[in-house]
Image (tube, rainbow, N blue to C red):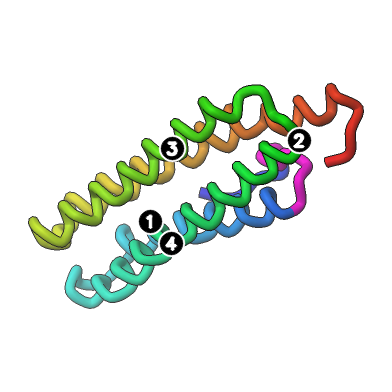
Amino acid sequence: MMWKEKYKIGVPLIDKQHEELFKRVSDFIQTVRGEGDWESKLSKVKENMEFMQEYVVVHFNAEEIYQEKIKYPDLENHKKVHAKFKADVNGYVQRLEQEGYSEELVQEFGGKLMAWLIMHVAAMDQKIGEYVEGQGGEI
């Protein structure tokens, strides 16, 4: 899963954060699918889980502050989508802590992360850049 220029929305801070998210999710998936026994991968998997929990909060807050600043008309809906994703990530973290870090559950989580990130950045977040461009304002 690679970052592509077409995912840029034209807001440097958000684009940089998106690129970091893509890198981390890609690293996470490569770790899960890579060679070696599962036990040896667990520390890297847990490290990535912690990062995702923290970074999505940082990123979503930055994105929402920016949307407030530009008076983005779909802000409330965007906040709801972010809140649901944060809840989903936290739900997986709880499941993993309760059920154990099974390879199957971690792979399921990785697939959901990848799909959500691509869909959200490539579709929903693109509208932010389009809105600003349509307003004739600077991003």
SS at mark 2?
loop
State the image coordinates of residue 5 (x, y, percent, origin top left): 72, 44
Name the residue beneath numbered marker 1.
Answer: 29
Query: Residue 11 colored magenta?
Result: yes
> Mark 1 belongs to which amino acid?
Ile
State the image coordinates of residue 6 (x, y, percent, origin top left): 70, 37
> Mark 2 belongs to which amino acid?
Ile
Q: Residues within 10 Å of mark 2 (few under 14, many from 20)?
A: some
Instruction: Specify whether 133 is left or right of 63.
Output: right
Magenta span of residues:
6-12
**Mark number, residue 116:** 3
Give the Cα separation between the discs numbered 4 and 3: 17 Å
Give the Cα separation between the discs numbered 2 and 1: 35 Å
Name the residue beneath numbered marker 2.
Answer: 70
SS at mark 4?
helix
Do residues under tags 1 and 4 come within 8 Å of each other at their CB atoms?
no
7, above or below 56, in the image = above
Q: Nearer the viewer, residue 33 or 61?
A: 61
Q: Nearer the viewer, residue 100 or 3?
A: 100
> Mark 4 belongs to which amino acid?
Glu
